[in-house]
Image (cartoon, rainbow, N blue to C red):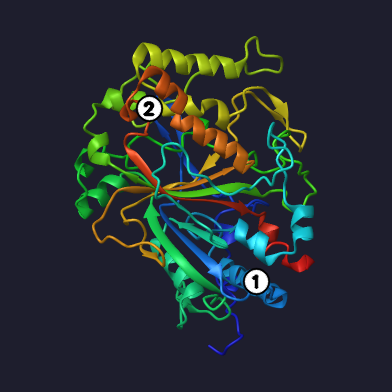
């Protein structure tokens, strides 16, 4: 193929005729995702099967504004070319592009960043950027890596070859094809130094299948059909964020953005990698695992993969609650720690992933109490810790792990949620071992970074066009 020519794939297959999907303004919404129904009628979203995250640092000097603007055009062109070949659906490919704070601090003039960066409105953090540096949390090891990548790409598809081909075309300097078609103008490897490649999967029975084939201790005990190594289902309809609720501007009170702001339809992203001791986890009986995943008052069939989320008496109509929901949740956590000696993960985060009071969104929509506004798109991995890294020693021995990809209205909000997950005060007050504090005794986080996921309209080198 002559350099500069494009293959008009849209002229060969009219994907719109196969599945009608509307491309969202956000990057985190995944059009075309389907649901399946589990026992007791619980709907569960089915995420794309294969995932890869590629992180990097821009390779040209920070002061070279012309190079950044040229890179903005090249990245936009490359993403458009890929999406002409693959539909933006699970059977095609989803691409998310996020940016770390070094990008904004070192690449964009301070006045431009200050004008457009979302600011926190949460008490005690007013005026801070709504994306801040990640910190070491109480349960994190001293040696945790707090990363400083300029950019991170997240690729998702039901077909692993789609992800592999796109990653190869973008970051390797050799001839490549996408879906069998030679492509030009997609290679970006000269623009950035790749720092890590993180590959993995999520889906029905995949953890057991991959874990057993890799010889990971304890994998044979993973319940059949589990989506993640620790069992259970991670995408029940009552635990998945509703439409655009994770965006900076959607729910009043988190940031100062409005629907007309530059970063409207963007969100704060947290990227981390956690090692999981599944042999230790499955040494616990099913009820013990249920209690640590949700809370110790649950009495349903502990062998079930899917459960309704932690039930609380939220009214489903407009009006004022007859109790303080924060106080109610705190009392339940205290009760569980005191009476049962166990704190459940679902109970820890229940009040910070969903609305405790109904509200009107920035778009004039009524959001009922209980509406979820934090979104997870995490996936399993057997890499130790990654498939490639410029800073980490790669251990060839497979290990169960989780790449956490989470989206919410601010980094400050995530920090509150993550501190609750450690429950350090409750643990100390009731002298609980780590193994009785939700998932703390079974997981170890090794890497963290906070990033900004822009809207699709500005996913290519945001703010560069304003320089």
Of the 4 image quadrants, the one containing the C terminus is bottom right
Q: Residue furthest front?
A: 142
Give the secondary structure at mark 2. loop
Pointers 1 and 2 in contact (C-beta within 8 Å)? no
Can the viewer see residue 373 in this picture? yes
Reply above or below: 385 against 464.
Answer: above
Q: Is residue 455 left or right of residue 273?
A: right
- Report x, y in % for residue 464: 72, 67
Q: Which residue is mark 1?
A: 62
Number of other residues with Cα within 10 Å of mark 2, as a class: few under 14, some 14 to 19, many 20 or more: many
The span from disc 1 to disc 2 (Cα, nearest Å) is: 44 Å
Q: Residue at x 53, y 61 (%)?
A: 149
Residue 425, labelled with which disc? none
* Nearer to me, 48 or 122: 122
For the residues carrying marks 1 and 2, which lies nearer the camera in this image? 1
- Report x, y in % for residue 433: 32, 26
* Nearer to me, 295 or 25: 295
Q: Which residue is mark 2?
A: 437
Reply above or below: 454 against 56.
Answer: above
Number of other residues with Cα within 10 Å of mark 1, as a class: few under 14, some 14 to 19, many 20 or more: some
Q: Residue 345: name its quadrant.
A: top left
- Report x, y in % for residue 77: 64, 73
Q: Residue furthest bottom?
A: 2
Q: Earlier in the sequence, mark 1 or mark 2?
A: 1
Can the viewer see residue 227 in this picture? no
Q: Residue at x 77, y 34 (%)?
A: 364
Say how many tags the image has. Answer: 2
- Report x, y in % for residue 177: 46, 77
Q: Residue at x 66, y 50 (%)?
A: 266
Reply above or below: 434 against 324.
Answer: below
Give the secondary structure at mark 1. loop
Q: Residue at x 38, y 52 (%)?
A: 201
């Amino acid at each position: 193929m002559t350099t500069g020519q494009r293959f008009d794939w849209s002229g060969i297959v009219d994907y719109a005729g196969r599945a009608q999907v509307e491309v969202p303004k956000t990057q985190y919404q995944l059009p075309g995702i389907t649901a399946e129904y589990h026992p007791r009628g619980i709907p569960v979203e089915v995420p794309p099967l294969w995932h890869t995250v590629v992180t990097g640092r821009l390779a040209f000097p920070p002061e070279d504004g012309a190079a950044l603007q040229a890179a903005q055009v090249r990245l936009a062109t490359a993403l458009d070319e890929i999406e002409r070949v693959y539909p933006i659906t699970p059977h095609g490919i989803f691409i998310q592009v996020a940016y770390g704070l070094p990008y904004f601090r070192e690449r964009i003039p301070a006045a431009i960043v200050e004008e457009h960066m979302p600011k926190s409105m949460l008490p005690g953090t007013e005026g801070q950027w709504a994306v801040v540096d990640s910190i070491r949390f109480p349960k994190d090891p001293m040696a945790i890596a707090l990363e400083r990548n300029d950019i991170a790409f997240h690729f998702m598809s039901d077909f692993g070859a789609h992800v592999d081909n796109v990653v190869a075309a973008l970051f390797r300097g050799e001839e490549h094809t996408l879906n069998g078609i030679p492509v030009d103008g997609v290679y970006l490897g000269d623009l950035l130094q790749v720092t890590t490649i993180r590959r993995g999967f999520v889906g029905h029975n995949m953890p057991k299948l991959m874990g057993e084939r890799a010889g990971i201790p304890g994998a044979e005990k993973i319940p059949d059909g589990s989506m993640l190594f620790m069992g259970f289902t991670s995408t029940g309809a009552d635990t998945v964020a509703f439409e655009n609720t994770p965006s900076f501007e959607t729910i009043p009170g988190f940031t100062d953005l409005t629907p007309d702001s530059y970063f409207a339809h963007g969100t704060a992203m947290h990227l981390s990698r956690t090692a999981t001791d599944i042999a230790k986890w499955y040494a616990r009986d099913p009820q013990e695992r249920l209690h640590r995943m949700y809370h110790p008052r649950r009495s349903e069939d502990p062998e079930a993969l899917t459960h309704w989320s932690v039930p609380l008496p939220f009214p489903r109509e407009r009006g004022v609650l007859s109790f303080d929901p924060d106080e109610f949740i705190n009392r339940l956590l205290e009760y569980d720690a005191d009476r049962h000696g166990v704190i459940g993960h679902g109970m820890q985060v229940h009040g910070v992933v969903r609305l405790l009071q109904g509200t009107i969104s920035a778009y004039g929509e009524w959001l009922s109490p209980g509406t979820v506004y934090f979104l997870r798109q995490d996936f399993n991995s057997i890499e130790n810790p990654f498939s490639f890294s410029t800073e980490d020693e790669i251990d060839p021995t497979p290990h169960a792990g989780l790449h956490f990809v989470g989206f919410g209205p601010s980094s400050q909000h995530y920090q509150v949620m993550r501190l609750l997950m450690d429950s350090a005060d409750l643990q100390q007050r009731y002298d609980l071992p780590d193994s009785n504090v939700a998932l703390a005794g079974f997981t170890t986080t090794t890497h963290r970074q906070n990033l900004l996921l822009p809207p699709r309209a500005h996913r290519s080198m945001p703010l560069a066009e304003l320089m």
